[in-house]
Structure formats: C-alpha cells, structure tokens
Amino acid sequence: MSEATVTDEEKDEKDAAEEEEEEEDEKESSPPPAKASGASGPAYERKGSGLANIWTIMKREIGAYLNSPVAYILICLTLVGVGVYFFYYDGGTWQADRASMSRLIGSSTANGSPNFLPMILCALTAPLFTMRALSEEKRMGTIELLITMPVKDSEVILGKYFAALSMVVVQLLLVIAYPLVMFKFPWHMGAFDWGPFWAGILGLFLMSAASIAIGMMFSSLTESQILSFFATSATLAFLYVIGSVVQSVKGLPGDIIAFLSFQTRYEPFSRGLIDTRAVVYFLSIAIFGTLVAFRNLESRKWN
C-alpha cells in the first residue's frame, strides 16, 4: 500500500510539473496585449502595416490642414486668381487660346516672364503646406513622441508628404474645373485639345511633388515655421525664375541653369510633350527632399 501511495504522489507531482511547463509555453507564445491609444497621443499610436501607418498619418495631417484657415484661404485664392486670369487677364486667356489653354498652364507668358499658375503652385502653395509639417512638431515637443511611437520614421515622413501633396492636388482639380465648365459642360464653347492640357497638369503635379519635398526638407531643419516658409519659398522661386535667363547665358553656366530650372523642365509639358528627362528630374528632387527629411528625423534618435 505504501509503495502504491508513493507512486501515485510521484505521478501527481509529475503531472503538475507538466501543466506548469505548458502554461509557461503558452505565455511565451501568446502575443503581447495591444497598447491602447491614449486621448492625448497621436491617432496612429497602434502599430500596423507600413501602408496602413502612412494612410493613418496622412489622414491625421489632412484633418489638421482642414482645421486651420490656411487651406481654405489658399483654395479661395486659387479660385479667384485662376478665375481672373482665365476670364479677364489680357482679354481672357480662354479667348486667346481656346485650343489647349497653354497660356493658362504655360511655363511663361508671351513676353517671357514666368507664368502665374506654375509660379504660385511652386513658390507659394508648397511652402505654406509644408512649413508646419515637422517644424510644428519640433516646436511643440511632439517630435520626440513621434520617433518613439511604433511607426517608422519613413512612414511619418511619407504620411506628411502625401498629405501636403493631396492638398495641392485639390488645387489642381480646381484648375481643371475651368476648361471643363467652358468646353465640356454645361457650356460647349467649341473644340478643345485635351492632350496638351493634361500634359500640362501632369507637369504641374510633378513640379509640385518636387516642391513639397523641398519644403519637407527645410521643415525638418528648423523649429520655426516662418523660417521654413521663407527658405522653401526663396529656393523654389530661384529654381523657377532662373529659367528666364537661360537664353542669355551661354556655355557651361547656361547648361547648369537649364538643368536646374523648374521652368525649363516644365516647359515641354505646357506644350503637350511629356519629357522623360523632366519626369526623372522632378522625381529625383522629390526623392532627395524626402530622404533628407527622413535622415534629419532619424538623427534625433542619436542626439
């Protein structure tokens, strides 16, 4: 009897030890509980896939734009400015060039000066939408919270970049509305060649993408939104205006100016031509600017 009792006790102890080992294995294999996002934390506090994080950050930034008067002021100015230029400037650009609206979206006017719409999108709109992208986060101290969140620095940069780019796309849609109304519906004012017009819109989009990347770069370098705005605006204005002097500068300096000039690169698009070299140039500027912004954000982890 005693031997049977001892055997039963050893068996019970062995079973209890096996149950404890199974419970420990289950604890180790089970995923950690999801971190609940606090009321004061960013809306993208919970980690997901890369695209999901970029989309969440993008929506948050667009909401911030729409909660400030800057976006609405720019949209109103775009409507008024393009409307005046479209209907009244020099007798109305739609009257002077019904075929393709090249005078509306062209790189320069008849006398060679930079055109209104590309210049505004390049040197004014992009700086206004990017000046707060990272500068405000630095000033308010929330940049430190961002870099410790379970999202990658590249996702933060891309989310903010695409948010600013989407606001510029809204302005481009407003520009598209004018010829649609005049030549498609409800009024049919005659034939319209949409090919050059869409090529010009593509050029404006690519130039805006490059401009926003430069704005993101300067926003990542300073805590001052004003400094970020003026640095971006001055750089973009310089890159656009230097195209006006490219014909008067010969040799290597002229080639360098033509290579760097936004106006020169955009000109083929305004004439209905899609220049692959210009596409590569604008995309390279966009990649360079976002990469510099990413490196500047990443470097704060080591400071």
Image (spheres, grey):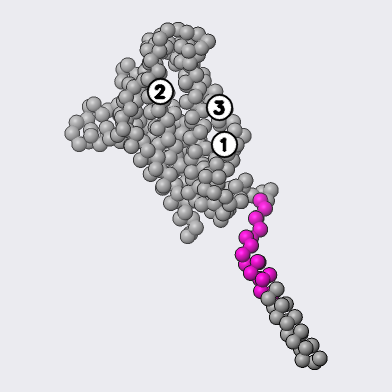
Q: Residue at x 51, y 41 (%)?
A: 160
| Sequence-first tag of 2 and 1 | 1
Amino acid under disc 3? Ile
Q: Residue furthest left?
A: 251
Residue topped by disc 2: 198
Residue contact at pointers 3 and 1, CB within 8 angstroms: no
Instruction: Determine the CA span between mark 3 and mark 1.
Output: 15 Å
Amino acid under disc 1? Ile
Judge depth for marks 3 and 1 and give the one in front: 1
| Sequence-first tag of 2 and 3 | 3
Quadrant occupied by the N terminus: bottom right
Secondary element type, mark 2:
helix
Q: Position of residue 280 (x, y in %)?
A: 33, 37
Image vertical order of residue 73 relative to residue 1, above or below:
above
Q: Position of residue 16 (x, y in %)?
A: 72, 77
Image vertical order of residue 20 relative to residue 159, above or below:
below
Range of residues picked out in magenta: 20-37
Sort mark 1 into few (<14), some (14-19) or many (20+) by Cα contacts within 10 Å: some
Sort mark 2 into few (<14), some (14-19) or many (20+) by Cα contacts within 10 Å: some
Residue topped by disc 1: 62
Q: Position of residue 67 (x, y in %)?
A: 62, 34
Total marks in image: 3
Amino acid under disc 2? Trp
Secondary element type, mark 1:
helix
